Every structure is written in structure tokens, then in C-alpha cells.
Amino acid sequence: MFVEEAVVPYCCGTARVADYVQGGRLCWSVRHDCAGGSREVACGYERLPDDWRQAVLEQCGTFRLRFPDDLGAGRVAVLRVLRRHGFAMGELRAVLDSGVSGTRAELTLLADRCGAAVWIGRE
């Protein structure tokens, strides 16, 4: 499991926002460093809240998941996963052509769910 962290302003100092995949789920946590040590102040599943997600994208990089030109027999399964991921029917062709951008953790999970030969790279 890999964890990417961004540092954000928080309370009397800073906090580390982590974005990762665990047990087949997208997870995130926020840890604040204070005089008493580091402690988790927030955590959750699925997509990070927008301001923290933006910090992860800015500090850790934006990644893009790309699909091969010919998905073959896996095409229907990939389209099903993309629909469940929230893409509208009318967007699917463009998504297959240009890929999906996001955090490394978001795209790692999406790639795992697609079960097809895809690749993830930095934008």
C-alpha cells in the first residue's frame, strides 16, 4: 500500500492529508502534529473533501489513467465500472479516448476495478 501526503494549514500549525487505497476502498485521513504528538483529526472513505483533495493534487501531482485502444472482451466490464464511477453514458467515448485524471490513489482503485490493461502516469 502506498500513501501520498500533502501538508495543509490546520489549527495552530499544519496537518498531513493522506490519500490511499486499503481493502479495495479509497481512504483518506488527516493527522495534525501538535505538542502532544501526532493525532488523527479526520478520516473517511471515498473521495477526499475538495480543499484537501486539491492540496494532494498540487503537492503530489495529478495522474491520468489511460485505456488501450482495443479493450477487447473487457470493454463491457470497463464501461460498467466507469458508469458506476459516475460517468454519464454520453461521456464514455471521451473518457476511453482521453482517460481519467485524479489522485494516484483514486486512479489505482479505478484501475483495479476495471480489471483491464490500463496504465497510470503523471500529467
Image (cartoon, rainbow, N blue to C red):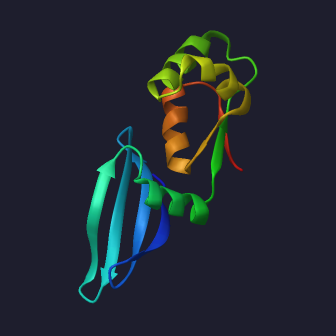
- Give the side of residue 48 with respect to residue 102, left or right: left
- Give the side of residue 115 with respect to residue 119, left or right: left
Hey, which quadrant is residue 76 in on the image?
top right
Residue 33 drawn above or below residue 31 = below
Q: Position of residue 47 (x, y in %)?
A: 41, 46
Residue projecting furthest to the left: 36
Hey, which quadrant is residue 84 in on the image?
top left
Residue projecting furthest to the bottom: 35
Residue 99 visible to an observer of this rendering:
yes
Residue 3 visible to an observer of this rendering:
no
Residue drawn 37% across and 54% down? 28
Residue drawn 45% across and 54% down? 50
Q: Position of residue 31 (x, y in %)?
A: 33, 70
Residue drawn 35% across and 41% down? 23
Give the total of numbered labels.
Answer: 0
In front: 36, or 1?
A: 36
Residue projecting furthest to the right: 69
- Give the side of residue 18 with respect to residue 93, left or right: left
Residue 54 drawn above or below residue 27 = below
In front: 117, or 92?
A: 92
